[in-house]
Image (spheres, rainbow, N blue to C red):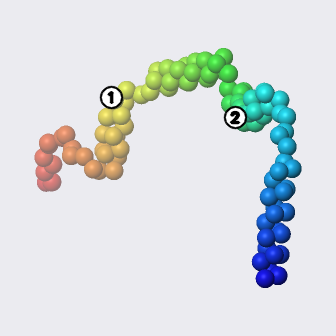
Amino acid sequence: METNNNLQQQIDETLNVLDNIKEVNVSPFFKDKTMNVLFAENKETQNTIWAWFTPQLQLATLACVVILNVIAFTKLETASDYEENVSEFATSYGLSESEDYSLILNN
């Protein structure tokens, strides 16, 4: 029976502790302030990664890419140059048929 008394005493002490709990006064905007502080740190971290790539820099980069493409396109060799190079290669290594159809007769 002593364990039951001891157990009942512990239960009573626990319930008495609950009676002593008082309401805590908190500022009505505490949650808003805390959320703003938490999310403000995350936004700053994300913005610092791409902050240097401003719209002006994007426009300048686009202009440079377009100019380089135009220069490369104008310097591009035409298809006739390619055909000339291939035929020259083929004749130099004997890969093409000869256009001369003359017969050589040995006397």
- Percent coordinates x, y for residue 67 in the rendering: 55, 19
Q: Quadrant of the N terminus?
A: bottom right
- Residue 90's spot in the image, x, y percent? 31, 45
The span from disc 2 to disc 1 (Cα, nearest Å) is: 53 Å
Q: According to the image, label 1 marks what residue? A: 80
Position of 62 compared to 21: left or right?
Answer: left
Q: Is residue 36 visible?
A: no
The residue sitting at 36% across, 34% down in the picture is 82
Residue 17 vs 101, above or below: the answer is below
Q: Which residue is mark 2?
A: 46
Q: Residue at x 81, y 53 (%)?
A: 18
- Is 76 situated above or below 89? above
Q: Which mark is residue 54?
A: none
User: SS of the residue at dot 1?
Assistant: helix
Q: Amino acid at mark 1?
A: Ser
Which secondary structure, mark 2? helix
Residue 70 location in percent, x, y? 49, 20
Is 105 in front, or is 43? 43
Q: Quadrant of residue 55?
A: top right
Question: Is residue 85 among the parts visible in the rendering?
Answer: yes
Q: Is residue 16 rendered to the left or right of residue 53? A: right
Rendered image quadrant of residue 33: top right
Q: Report whether 84 appears left or right of 68.
A: left
Q: Residue furthest front?
A: 1
The reply to whether the C-beta atoms of the residues labelled 2 and 1 are less than 8 Å apart is no
Dot 2 amino acid type = Gln
Q: Nearer the viewer, mark 2 or mark 1?
A: 2
Q: Nearer the viewer, residue 30 or 93?
A: 30
Instruction: Name the residue located 33 percent from the left edge and 28 percent from the top edge.
Output: 80
Q: Looking at the image, which is closer to me, 44 or 101?
A: 44
The mark that comes first in sequence, 2 or 1, is 2
